[in-house]
Amino acid sequence: MMKLLHTADLHLGRLFHERSLIEDQRYILNQLTDILAEDPHDGLIIAGDIYDRSIPSPEAVTLFGEFLGNIRRRFPLLPVFIIPGNHDSAARLGFGTELFSKLGVHINADPEASAEPVIIDAGGERCAVFLLPFLTPGSLSPERARQEGQEGAEDVSAPVPIRSQAKLAEEASLRLEEAVRKVRDSGVQWAVLAGHLFTLGGVESDSERIFLGTAEQVDVNLFKTFDYVALGHLHRSQQAAPNTWYSGSPLVYSFGETNRDKVFLSAELKNTQKTGKPETGELFGRDGKDQGSEGPPRKSQVTVTPIPVSPLRKLTSLSGTFDYFYKDTGGAFEQYKNDYLEISLTDRRLVENPLALLRPRFPYIMSVKQGEAFTAYYSKPEAVNSTVSASGGEKTDILDDFRAFLEDIYGQGDPEKESLFRDFAEELNDETS
């Protein structure tokens, strides 16, 4: 039996509504380390997007270094497998690969090396782990032997770079399929792939939709030869194919995901000669298909178990009137005091600076929305034409608010900015009326 712990999309150094999440991310990484201590695994896979930016902050780099150092101190023999995602700089993440590999931390930032597996041994049972980093345009070219066989290939000395994500994945799969065949022929029991891909049918989340960049959806069946495919890129934990899973991000990075539990995945690979359907829907044959009661003997099975992740602070969305939150004396919201909060006000009048007014009661409030007030203002300006101030007074024109804002920030008004603001307000009013 072989057990691998799978996570991805750490996004270390990420800012959430301009707030650093380093403390929250340290909490999660410590939790991951504790899980390994409580339930020993034979390997740890981190499938891309280690950092949130290609040039990570010093705090993010320090945090990841602390994490790897802690892992190595507590589990000196545990292999760690890391690939860059689309948010990472492959060159930066791959620095010191040769040195780290001797310490059991295997980082592959080179797609050309993805067909060179790391073999791990657990009690005489062996597993080949292949590492496929995020495929950028031109990172792979057709192998010369295949190109020479193409009709009309005029210059085989200069392979044409592949630019689309789908074609890059196809090229990678051809190389990986041959490599998997070789390791199986050598007696290795299992083949596992770590990748950072956007598969056909994968379900996106609010927190990563705008970060897909050049990624295109790829056919997950390209990798059906593997016993287990550990993917990163999509932040929602999900099963993309019988043998393929996204662990999802270990933290919620969007208020649109507030009701979604976060997990690490524990993949358990077993040898068996039993036939018949498995007891759960999480056990599959080597070809990625449930063999059924009359199929051939199953040579390997995979059981995937989600391990819940507990965040340092929850993300919570609440709605109600401003007074409902601001004047509450019954302690109704005490349970949300330490949550990251998004509050949607239902008032039909605008409230001035609600974030600052509510922060003493909710120190971790991140966002206040006033959608109903804006809709009411611009749809019926003659009916709703005032804003609520902290002192309870009223102003009769939103342009006065904007002019006061400019004077507060710059010390004087700006007719050009006021004109642009007026045009924008009128355009918005036309769209909502």
Image (tube, grey):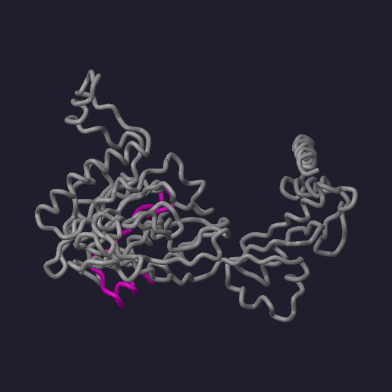
Q: Is residue 286 shown above or below 328?
A: above
Residue situated in front as seen by the camera: 235 or 351: 235
Whether residue 72 is visible, yes or no, is: no
Query: Which quarter shows the C terminus?
Result: top right
Image coords of residue 386 (percent x, y): 86, 54
Would residue 267 be found to the left or right of residue 418 on screen?
left
Query: Which quarter shows the N terminus?
Result: bottom left
Image coords of residue 244 (percent x, y): 34, 56
Residue situated in front as seen by the camera: 270 or 338: 270
Q: Quadrant of residue 238?
A: bottom left
Q: Quadrant of residue 229?
A: bottom left
Q: Quadrant of residue 274?
A: bottom left
The number of callouts visible is: 0
Would residue 77 be found to the left or right of residue 324 on screen?
left
Whether residue 162 is visible, yes or no, is: yes
Q: Is residue 378 shown above or below 304?
A: above
Residue situated in front as seen by the camera: 98 or 147: 147
Residue 314, magenta (yes or no) = no
Residue at (76% x, 49% y) in the render: 405
Residue 43, magenta (yes or no) = yes
Residue at (22% x, 20% y) in the render: 155
- Residue at the extreme bottom of the image, as rendered: 330
Image coords of residue 410 (percent x, y): 72, 45
Would residue 268 be found to the left or right of residue 197 on screen?
left
Tell me which segment is drawn in magenta.
Answer: 31-56
Residue situated in front as seen by the camera: 305 or 156: 305
Residue at (58% x, 73% y) in the render: 338
Residue at (82% x, 60% y) in the render: 389
Image coords of residue 45 (percent x, y): 30, 60
- Residue at the extreme left of the image, as rendered: 186
